[in-house]
Amino acid sequence: MSQLTNRRGFFKTAAAGAIGAAASVETVMAASPKASADRDLIILGAGCGGLCCAVRAAELGLKVTLLEKMSTSAGNTIYAAGFLLGVHTSFQAGKNDADSVDAFYEDMMKVSQGKGDPKLTRKVAEDADKTLEWLHKSAGINFSAGSKLVWPMLSRAHLVTGKVKPGGGQLSLSLIERAKALGVDLRFNTKAVAILQDEKTGAINGVRIKTKEGLSELRSKKGVVIATGGFSANQAMVTQYIGSGGAKMPIRGSRIIAGENIALTAPFLPKVVNVDQYHCGPIHGPTGANPLNIVNNGVCINRKGERFTNEGQTYVQMSRDVASMTPDNWAFMVTDQTGRENPVLANDWDSYARLGAPVYVGNTIEEAAKKAGLDPAKVAATVAEYNKAVKEDKRGALVPVNTLPKAPLVEKAPFYIVPFQGGMTATFGGPLINTNGQVLDTENRPIDGLFAVGNAVGGLFYDNYVGGAQLTSAAVFGVAVAEFVKG
């Protein structure tokens, strides 16, 4: 418990060693194709996808070893708010009757600009409900559901509830406890440095691992599951595949997501897709505080006190604008007491308070701006121009425009200025899989014994994703791999 809740200090030391570690990975052929394997499946990574796979496989009677390179679950799952998506689950209790699997699928495809793999997307949409019900029945995970959020989440959102915050931490803890109860061989501080294969058949049959005792090998009868996440914290890979704009973004989640999904699988020539795609969002980099919805509820300015982006865009596009349109990747949201009291923003304000991120408050715009180190007169003039456009319904004449359906006025004291950056959340690229979670090679054929789930996978997401869909898809495919392996 303490490791989950006190992870910020831990990652300060862990991140430096993790970034770029995948560059040293080598391929190792199994020394003997007849080597014994006392386990059925080896899973790399103790995030949502890996843990769901381990729990389901153990339930089905498979002998499972799960390896995690850190001392606890340390990927993006524990940083996630904890939303998963469902259409007609028992938790929604008739609150989402107008929705459908087809509508969910179509929204996911629309958000991915039609470039998400249709079969994988359909799999998530069709299996989401039963996966959430399984999480509750198997691991005792509870959800708060029924709230109507903005499109495309709508009333599909299921927030993991429990004593650990955020919800992703509770999800991880519950799955770890269930895995232990089922007898899963959980090994922390154990890093996979190579994938092994049978030198005669080519089938994946184990991994080479590194622990404090040194190097050793583990074998498995039915293969290896890559559940290590993407490469969002590997600056070399981010720069190579995404560019310098992404590379200068602070990390919004885990600092140890180092690209093993690409480096470990590369020798087997998988079909790697969408490595130029990623998700970003607002973050206060030094503390990790998340102003998620605040960025759409006020006036967004740069250090000159000028508006430079449309507050009606998604927080993803606004974050990209901050990274690309400001020299130091810093912006400031100006809002007022009405925004401070908006219940939709409660979690965001709590994030800044809980993590000690600065919020500059003043009885006038000028007072707040001065505290923030901004030009008081310029900020006041920018806000006045914005308010005038809102009142006169001339937001289309602003430069840039503001396209919020209902743009809030910023005129009720006290006033708040919230600093934030565009931050890297997760990468969308990796080996392409089929609906069984099997990694495909460059000829679109399954690589025998090699599986991938969660953010380690490429093909599901492009440009953006429906909030909650990453945890949902990780769980769906974690379960799918276990059931396919069992046969």
Image (cartoon, helix red, strand yellow):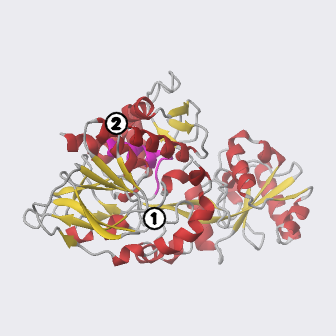
Q: CA distance from mark 1 to mark 2?
A: 27 Å
* Amino acid under disc 1: Ile
Q: Which residue matches tag 2?
A: 127
Q: Nearer the viewer, residue 151 or 207?
A: 207
Q: Main secondary structure of the magenta part?
A: helix
Q: Position of residue 264 (x, y in %)?
A: 30, 68
In the rendered structure, the answer to whether residue 384 lies left or right of residue 3 reads: right
Q: Please give the label number shown on residue 257.
A: 1
Residue most toward the front? 213
Residue 178 sits in quarter: top left
Q: Nearer the viewer, residue 117 or 58?
A: 58
Comparing labels 1 and 2, the label whose residue is closer to the camera: 1
Magenta residues, as a range? 464-479
Q: Position of residue 106 (x, y in %)?
A: 39, 42
Q: Position of residue 420 (x, y in %)?
A: 68, 63
Label 1 secondary element: loop
Q: Is residue 403 magenta?
A: no
Observer able to see residue 321: yes
Residue 81 vertical position relative to residue 209 in the rendered view, above or below: above
Q: Residue at x 69, y 65 (%)?
A: 399
Residue 36 vertical position relative to residue 57 in the rendered view, above or below: below
Residue 128 vertical position relative to residue 254 in the rendered view, above or below: above
Q: Residues within 10 Å of mark 1 (few under 14, many from 20)?
A: many
**Quadrant of the rendering where the C terminus is positioned:** top left
Q: Earlier in the sequence, mark 1 or mark 2?
A: 2
Q: Is residue 475 magenta?
A: yes
Label 2 secondary element: helix
